[in-house]
Image: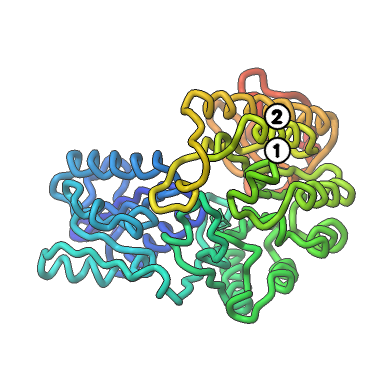
Amino acid sequence: MTDQSNYLKAAYFTLGCKLNFAETSTIGKILSGKGIIRAAKGEIPDICVVNTCSVTEMADKKGRRLIRSLASRYPDATIVVTGCYAQLKPEAVAALPGVDIVLGSNEKLKIAEYIESWLSDRRKRTEVTPVFSIKEFHPSCERGDRTRFFLKVQDGCNYFCTYCTIPYARGRSRSGVTEDLVGMAREAVAAGGKEIVITGVNIGEYGKDNGQDLFSLLRRLDEVEGIERYRISSIEPNLLTEEIIRWIAEESRAFMPHFHIPLQSGSDAVLKLMNRRYDTSLFSQKIKTVREVIPDAFIGVDIIAGARGETPEQWERSLSFAESLDVTRYHVFPYSERPGTKALLLGDAVSQEEKHRRVSVLTKISDLKMESFMRKNLGTVRPVLWEHPSGEGMMHGLTDNYLRVQAPLDLAMINTVVPTLLESIHEEEHDLIEGRPAENMI
Ligand code: SF4
């Protein structure tokens, strides 16, 4: 057995999106390559790495709270903070108690060098490249859990939606090279991966900076033997082409009937205020096309409630548009005021109380749509990738069309795709289905 007592131990904390989780896992790999091992549960870390998010004011707050609590729990640990909040507010982050190193988006994956310098001179550092001069792209393909990997194909965004800070935190759109990304998918197979979630900030922009092409990337990935499932984490409606939708429906081997498309508002006037690049008629056309060619696809849709400048009439319009769409589920976000964004100059703010009322109305619509989608699927047999035991003798998995299913644990089925009869909705967890693997049916 190796004596691990002399190694430095690092603990990792991630806030925010799938991209951040993938990058934290790359940081972990980089540091373990330098002999800094992952602290086991309950062990006191020598280094805490915090990968922050800044998508809302609440995300900033969570980051500050987390850093303060780490500083008091582990007063002797080196605290390194990176991610979008560190990029946007490096001074504020550096001023938090216990923070030793602050790294911006471009420095994130050069963390080992900064830790080495810190260990030799113990000098606090804040290293942040001005965001619009970031040109590098760091691809990554990281394990999310036993079976699923996250393949980062693109970073940054050129869209500048008026409410969003991401272009200021992650910079302009940059993409990976198809050949490298396909190579990473093959490595994921070798590491036991069955499913890849394609991630990025604005995936539909893939290749526009470096002469690559999203549709070709998807087709090349589809050919990688051993990957049984692909999902695109999210794609802007104007960039989800009819060609891609039809290809997923008719030709692709492993792309799942699952789409995640941000709407943000169902009022054309609000979409304009937000500087979104589509209108409601384009959006409903895309949903119609998906439903036409893949009737049982899961369609998740982001929507913002109470955006600044959203008048009561626009809200009503947005609501009835949201109700009318044949989608599966809404991810409802209360609008969050972000310093430095153009949205602050637009119209009046919606009161907190009204914003929360709008959130709860949309959430109810979403719950009804989700329930009806689940009911439509009951009684059918769908392929489930059984992912992990869930305690109490059960296992959990996902159908091709993204429904969560549980069944009595059968270890031989873990990490395999099994046709499963979807029997009923769980009594307490209303987004969970009770299923029976078809191999167990008499
Ligand atoms: S598309 Fe708009 S909302 Fe999405 S990351 Fe880019 S600027 Fe932000």
- Label 2 packing within 10 angstroms: few (<14), some (14-19), many (20+): many
Write the residue at 74% across / 43% down. 298
Q: Is residue 274 visible?
A: yes
Give SS at disc 2. strand
Q: Quadrant of residue 244?
A: bottom right
Amino acid carrying label 2: it is: Ile
Q: Is residue 398 visible?
A: no
Vertical arrangement, residue 402 with respect to residue 166, above or below: above
| Most foreground residue, 249 or 275 | 275
Vertical arrangement, residue 343 with respect to residue 19, above or below: above
- Residue 116, given in percent of the width and then of the height, sits at 21, 70
Q: Disc 1 vs disc 2: Cβ atoms closer than 8 Å?
A: yes
The residue singled out by tag 1 in the image is 403
Q: Is mark 2 within 8 Å of ligand 1?
A: no
Write the residue at 65% across / 40% down. 397
Q: Ligand 1 is located in which of the four quadrants?
A: bottom right
- Residue 80, given in percent of the width and then of the height, sits at 26, 57
On residue 433, the disc is 2
| Most foreground residue, 92 or 6 | 92
Amino acid carrying label 1: it is: Leu
